[in-house]
Image (cartoon, rainbow, N blue to C red):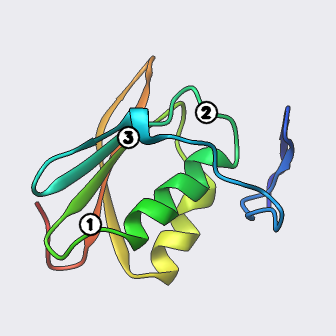
Amino acid sequence: MMSLHNENGPCDGKIPKDWNLPELSDLIKITSNCVQIDLRHQSAPTPLVATLKILDRLSPGQYFEGYYPKMPMHLFSHLQEEAWVWDVVEQNDQGIRLRIYREGQKP
């Protein structure tokens, strides 16, 4: 697996055992059927962990949209393990937006 370094140390797609998710509530927008969060300015592993924690808390029928600084490659194996489906909604110089939902519940 590829290893990248940032101020938090190596990023290998695994969640550090003693790592605490920073407070992100001011970055989250919730509607009746969608939870959105802009993670473009967060360092690893925050985007990975935040996405997985939010997905774990979605209500039936809700989907997730996350904004990332680049393609979140380490996220995809976690999504596959939990039977989530994703689509690239937008990709440009500012980042990438993914829509993640349960199979058979495409928004």
> What residue did someone put label 1 on?
101
Q: What residue type is labelled 2?
A: Gln
Mark 2 burial class by Cα count in 10 Å: few <14, some 14-19, many 20+: few
Mark 1 burial class by Cα count in 10 Å: few <14, some 14-19, many 20+: many
- Between 63 and 86, the one nearer to me in the picture: 63
Q: Which amino acid does label 3 sit on?
A: Ile
Tell me which residue sits at (47%, 76%) in the image: 80
- Between 45 and 19, the one nearer to me in the picture: 19
- Percent across and percent down for residue 102 are 26, 75
Q: Are marks 2 and 3 in contact (CB under 8 Å)?
A: no
Q: What residue type is labelled 1?
A: Tyr
Q: Which sits earlier in the primary sequence, circle 3 or circle 1? A: 3
Left or right placement of residue 13 versus residue 70 in this view: right
- Between 95 and 49, the one nearer to me in the picture: 49
Q: Which sits earlier in the primary sequence, circle 1 or circle 2? A: 2
Q: Is residue 73 above or below residue 53?
A: above
Mark 3 burial class by Cα count in 10 Å: few <14, some 14-19, many 20+: many
- Percent across and percent down for residue 91 are 36, 31
- The nearer-to-camera label among 1 and 2 is 2
Tell me which residue sits at (41%, 34%) in the image: 27
Tell me which residue sits at (63%, 58%) in the image: 74
Q: Is mark 3 on a helix, strand or loop?
A: strand
Choose top left, top right, bottom left or bottom right for residue 6: top right
Tell me which residue sits at (75%, 64%) in the image: 14
Q: Residue 42 carries which label?
A: 2
Q: In which quarter of the image is the C terminus?
A: bottom left
> What residue did someone put label 3 on?
37
**Outermost residue toward the top?**
93
Q: In which quarter of the image is the N terminus?
A: bottom right
Q: Is mark 1 on a helix, strand or loop?
A: strand
- Find the distance from the CA under tag 1 to the CA under tag 2: 22 Å
